[in-house]
Amino acid sequence: MKITHVETHPVRIPLKPERRMISSLGRHEVSRYVLVRIGTDTGIEGVGEATVMPRWSGETVWGCREIIDRLFAPVVVGCELHDVASVDAIAARMEAVAKHNWFAKSAIDMACFDALGRAAGKPVYELLGGPCRDRTFRCRFSMGAYDLERARRTAAERVVAGFRTIKVKVGGESDDDLARVRAVRDVIGPDLALDIDANCGWSAETAIRKVKALSDCRLALVEQPTPDGDYEAIARVRRETGATIMADDMCFDLVHARELVRNQACDVLNVYPGKQGGLAPARRMVEFAAAHGIACTIGSNLEWDVATAAMAHLITACPNMQVERFPGDALGPIYHEFSIVKQPLSIEGPLVTTPDGPGLGVDVDWGAVRANLATD
């Protein structure tokens, strides 16, 4: 099976008003992502999704489209697709013409896996080694840095919906963070898990002070407390607070993962195909973490159904995606006002079910895509 063409479709979908995200990175109210469609000489197609976010990874919908159209597509068209090794060969060709750009590369990787699965009549998790857990898994709920009234209301609603872990966005110097986290703990009670996520928004000193101040809240997990690139800072927070630390925003490839290991900087690694450049490199990172005694769970960039399906396949196939111990984030589709697939993923409260159809198991509604192209 040979790749004959690559299409890029920039799409714009607003978040539901009650799900709009506020974090130390700012506000996220509209998702402008790129859907990628590859064609083959057999007539089989594959789809992928680049969940680009400028303030997070540095990639934009416009840059993503251009780098795929002008650099990646020319080296991908004509490549053979037979197995996972051929996806790795395609990744090497993309790496040779452009460094980084992980989300753009991941969209092509996902589309290749989707096409391979459709050709074989198998779900992607079978291509990744087969299922190691039930296809239905539990997520936590991630809430923004809301005012106290909204934080309390959202927490109460999510507990009623069946969530057992609530993540609260924090970050910045204001002690409003402390009040928000305490308010959520009061609402959810003593028995449910409470995580916080600073998205690189604290210095080491601030993180240490605030995590210690929240000791009465019995935090289950402290996610990305300190700035990108400062491995000593996150390691210091881990040493001086004794908290369970998750790294996310500072770990895109194995170079970053090795630095985290070398500095003994985290207990858990947040992994997702978009951030890691695709399913194949994400699986390698999960295996690397396992070899060094670090658990992994799923992270999110508020993906749509295509990328969320890829995340679900990774969870289903990788033993070290320890979502049972550390529920992750794979609820992106429910944050958005509508879907661009014909049959949205099965998401019921905190429970997500990995599709078992061929490929990623989702079919894009190209009419909906054309109706919602990003033009701004």
Image: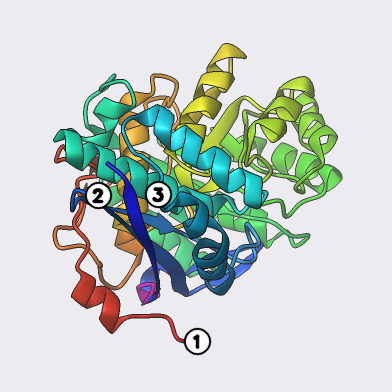
Residue type, label 2: Gly
Location of the N terminus (image quadrant): top left
Image coordinates for residue 185, horizontal then vertical, percent? 49, 46
Toward which corner of the image does residue 322 lie, by quadrant? top left
Residue bearing mark 3: 78
For marks 3 and 1, the one nearer the N-term is 3
Label 1 with label 2: CB-CB less than 8 Å: no
Q: Nearer the viewer, residue 56 or 23?
A: 56
Q: Residue at x 14, y 35 (%)?
A: 121
Q: Residue at x 52, y 23 (%)?
A: 295
16 in magenta: yes
Above or below, comparing residue 307 to residue 314 in the picture: below
Residue bearing mark 1: 376
Q: Which residues are magenta?
A: 13-17
Residue type, label 1: Asp
The mark lying in front, picked from 3 and 1, is 3
Q: Helix or strand or loop: what does disc 2 sit on? A: loop
Above or below, comparing residue 68 to residue 287 in the picture: below
Q: What colouring style does the render use?
A: rainbow
Q: Nearer the viewer, residue 339 or 113?
A: 113
Label 3 with label 1: CB-CB less than 8 Å: no
The mark lying in front, picked from 2 and 3, is 3
Residue bearing mark 2: 349
Q: Residue at x 32, y 39 (%)?
A: 312
